[in-house]
Amino acid sequence: MGGLSSMKNKWILVTGATSGFGRAIAERFAAEGNNLIITGRRGERLEAIKTDFERKYRVQVVAKTFDVRNPEEVKLFASFLEENNLVPDVLVNNAGLAAGKNKIQDGNLDDWEQMIDTNIKGLLYITRAILPSMIKRNSGHVFSIGSVAGHIVYPEGNVYNATKFAVKALNEAINLDLMGTAIRCCSIDPGAAETEFSLVRFKGDEGKAAGVYKGYEALNAADIADALWYVANTPAHVNITNLVIYPTAQRSVYVWDKK
């Protein structure tokens, strides 16, 4: 029977681990004595995190730089894991982004492609590549980082909303497809959280990004890491399939208490 500190010496795979939720989730598990497989597109930052966590937490860290949008690179990554007999105990599909905030009629096609290819197809490529080895061993936990944007559509969210609705649907589908195995599956869906998210969405405009979080205390990356840690450590007969987390000042996509 698992407790809230039962997970140790496991292998945790986190995509998009160079910042934000991904980095915080990886650090939370490493701090508890688990080994990491971290991926991302920013190689120098990924290697710096590897060095930092290995020194700080005395765990093994495997860092692989590639883009989850590229199916061939994902296949090479999966082959590397297989060759080294690395089967993740926890898979965290974290890589994702929002790009732009235009109405459909003013939409930027490059933004659309980037969001669809990363948030939906990237999640599918990684899950398809990793799940067979987890099923063969018949143990593990699959997480996807969704969003409240996958529950309620908001103005100018359109394609980002659509990708997060897809994450919610795919999480439910994975749960169904894993029936008969011991593998559990959960989507963690945050509300407003202060990470690089808005900076990416507004193409590096720091003023616009900061404005999103004015007047209230937003969630932070460590809050999401704590939630995921909790779910991962529930007893084996407990399957929390969806966890929606808002900051206290936000009660829905539309209801806020901003000072």
Image: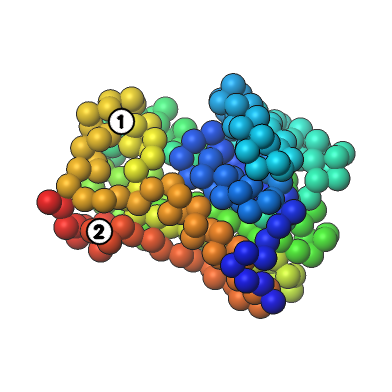
Q: Amino acid at mark 1?
A: Phe
Residue 100 in the image, given as x and y percentages of width and height = 32, 33
- Foreground of the two, 156 or 51: 51
- Outermost residue, left direction? 259
Determine the residue positioned at 22% across, 29% down. 207
Residue 20 in the image, given as x and y percentages of width and height = 46, 40
Give the label, 1 or 2, closer to the camera: 2
- Outermost residue, top direction? 44
Where 107 falls versus 171 (above or below)?
above
Element under label 2? Answer: loop
Residue 159 seen in this snapshot: no
Determine the residue positioned at 51% across, 45% down. 24
Circle 2 sits on which residue? 250
Q: Residues within 10 Å of mark 1 (few under 14, many from 20)?
A: some
Q: Which mark is residue 202?
A: 1
Q: Residue 173 vs residue 258: left or right?
A: right
Q: Residue 146 vs residue 210: left or right?
A: right
Position of the N terminus by quadrant: bottom right
Residue 154 in the image, given as x and y percentages of width and height = 26, 51
